Amino acid sequence: MINSGDTAWVLASGALVLFMTPGLAIFYGGMVRAKSVLNMMMMSFAAMGVTTIIWVLYGYSLTFGKSHGGLIGGFENLGLSKTLDQVVGPEGHQIPMLAFAMFQLTFAIITVALLSGAIADRAKYGSWVLFVAVWITVVYIPVAHWAFAAQGGSGGWIVDKLGALDFAGGTVVEINSGAAALALALVLGKRDGFKRDPMRPHNMPLVLLGAGMLWFGWFGFNAGSALSAGSLAATAMINTQIASAAASMTWVLFEKRRDGKATTLGVASGAIAGAVVITPACGFVNPLGALILGLIAGVAGSYAVSRKYKFGYDDSLDVVGVHGVSGVIGMIGIGLLATLSVNSAGKDGLFSGGGTQLLVDQLIAIVVVALFSFCATWIIATVISKTIGFRATHDDEIGGLDTVYHAESAYDITGNSNRY
């Protein structure tokens, strides 16, 4: 009953997506100042550890278990106890449920890890670990059930009842993380020196290396979501490459025109924005559609990132501007550019003769997920702040979080050679 080729592809894709989180750690680590680089990386690794434990205990069951009103799954698969001999997928393309569970676990990990970029340099590490556990439970699991848990008409309300399309996580990962990041940034407040001190990335080679790891892993993220090694996976993969490449170029062109320089941070951020924008649409649009979305995302992302200074919120590493904004564009792009010629399980968008209904459904999904994620995250972060405290002390922030929370530093700046 198990298709070995499809299974191998999903297992490889799961490994690729997991690889993205260390890539994110390096990407984010290079973007912060040297005094807090290890803390920034540790936040991603905490997401890997805590999320995995929750996923095994109850996360997978509540996400992909039998739906209750389209809002949440059930408790029938706690501890992954009923997945050992079960399969998922249509006849001829079935894979072990554990392979699917592993693949989806990596999505949960990278989503919550993304949020750390919004509060870089100023969050207590222990409070972050608690936040990860609560946020995955209260926010990620319900949203993932809404958008991913299609079970013959008894799954999540977005995919089964509303009929919105999201191939690989435009709502679940990108809009969810963008809205949550904004809430976190507002609750914790601005870094000391925001708008006054440069706060430039301390290591641009790390940023480019991390961006390259993310770009590479994104092929598993998007093409793996086909859950089979066929033409749909091939379409999703090349669409991912096209959009990422296009956005990286339009970002730096826009930056060159605006600021007079094309930066390495810009090309890295543009590549990520392109991968984000195509995430929900990669299995529903053709390569030309992917090119259009990528070209738009590079300009829109660069503009959106610059707006945080005007609006006065300190989204340290631009989660809102890159992931939130590009995720919204990608979801809207489905309503405009989707075509049944790419995926017979999809729908035609407005420009393919499908009318406006799909676009309306996409907009509803965007608004509901963004509002739910923002409000729930605001409440979670506020409760943590008012109880055990979420923000580091002023002295710890100024001195750097690496030595305070981890008793280590990323670089030996003392020149002391007597070290073991």
Image (cartoon, rainbow, N blue to C red):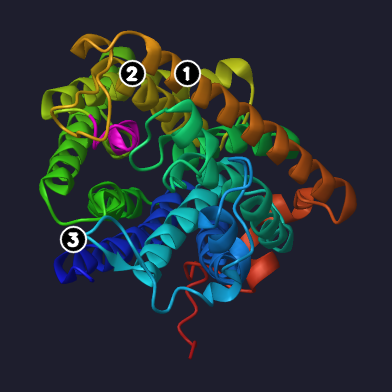
Residue at the spot of label 1: 363
Q: Nearer the viewer, mark 1 or mark 3?
A: 3
| Residue 104 in picture, x, y percent from top left | 42, 58
Q: Mark 2 is on which residue type? A: Gly
Residue 283 within the segment the image draws in magenta = yes
Q: In the displayed structure, does residue 128 sit left or right of residue 281?
A: right
Picture disc at residue 100: none
Residue 403 versus residue 147 in the image, above or below: below
Q: Mark 1 is on which residue type? A: Leu
Could you say whether the residue bearing mark 1 is in a helix, strand or loop? helix
Could you say whether the residue bearing mark 3 is in a helix, strand or loop? loop
Q: Earlier in the sequence, mark 1 or mark 2?
A: 2
CB contact under 8 Å: marks 1 and 2: yes
Residue at the spot of label 2: 335
CB contact under 8 Å: marks 1 and 3: no
| Residue 84 in picture, x, y percent from top left | 42, 79
Instruction: Identify the residue shown where x is 27% and y is 37%.
Output: 271
Q: Nearer the viewer, mark 2 or mark 3?
A: 3
Q: CA distance from mark 1 to mark 3?
A: 34 Å
Q: Mark 3 is on which residue type? A: Gly
| Residue 353 in picture, x, y percent from top left | 21, 9
Magenta span covers which residues?
273-284
Residue at the spot of label 3: 92
Could you say whether the residue bearing mark 2 is in a helix, strand or loop? helix
Residue 97 within the segment the image draws in magenta = no
Q: CA distance from mark 1 to mark 2?
A: 9 Å
